[in-house]
Amino acid sequence: MGPYKGNRYRGEGHTIASDGCGPTSVTNLLTGYGIDVTPDAVAGWAQEDIAHRDNPIPQLEHFGVEAEAFTGLTREEYADKLIEAFDEGKPVIALMPPESPDGFWTVNGHYALLLGI
């Protein structure tokens, strides 16, 4: 991991290395747009406003990148939205929720930056 490995994030015992997939995904997207930022800077801003801690949209907008959410979709609808975004050259930060009934993505929840299929 990078130099931010030991930084606290989300309280005692949590670090960017162990629990920072959201800020890391946001950072990867931002640096792809030429914005010089680190995961600990994104996480630090998000920690200041706890309502934004687990939501990449205000994190992206804080750094000047427009974002939109699509939620409540079936897998097929989600796949269609992903293909549409990729066809338009847009990256996607996907949340694989822990409440997925069959553990399709993850049992703990995880953010990932997707650039295409």
Image (cartoon, helix red, strand yellow):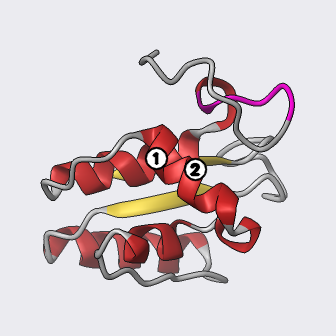
Q: Which mark is residue 79?
A: none
Residue name at image x 78 percent, y 58 percent: 100
- Residue at left 86%, top 31%? 12
Residue found at the far front of this picture:
48
The residue positioned 27% from the left and 75% from the top of the image is 85
Secondary structure state at the residue bearing disc 2:
helix
Circle 2: residue type: Gly
* Residue 6 appears left or right of 108: left
Quarter location, residue 68: bottom left
Disc number placed over residue 41 in the picture, else none: 1
Residue 67 falls left or right of residue 55: left
Q: Position of residue 10 (x, y in %)?
A: 77, 44
Judge whether residue 15 can be spotted in this image: yes
The part of the chain drawn in magenta is 12-16
Residue 115, given in percent of the width and then of the height, sits at 25, 53
Relative to the observer, which residue lies in front, 105 or 14? 14
Task: Reply above or below: 15 against 99.
Answer: above
Tell me the element at label 1: helix
The prevailing secondary structure element of the residues shown in magenta is loop
Number of disc labels? 2
Is 14 magenta? The answer is yes
Marks 2 and 1, how far apart at CA: 5 Å
2, above or below 93, in the image: above
Query: Which residue is label 2 attached to?
Result: 44
| For residue 45, side relative to residue 11 (left or right) | left
Q: Residue at x 75, y 66 (%)?
A: 50
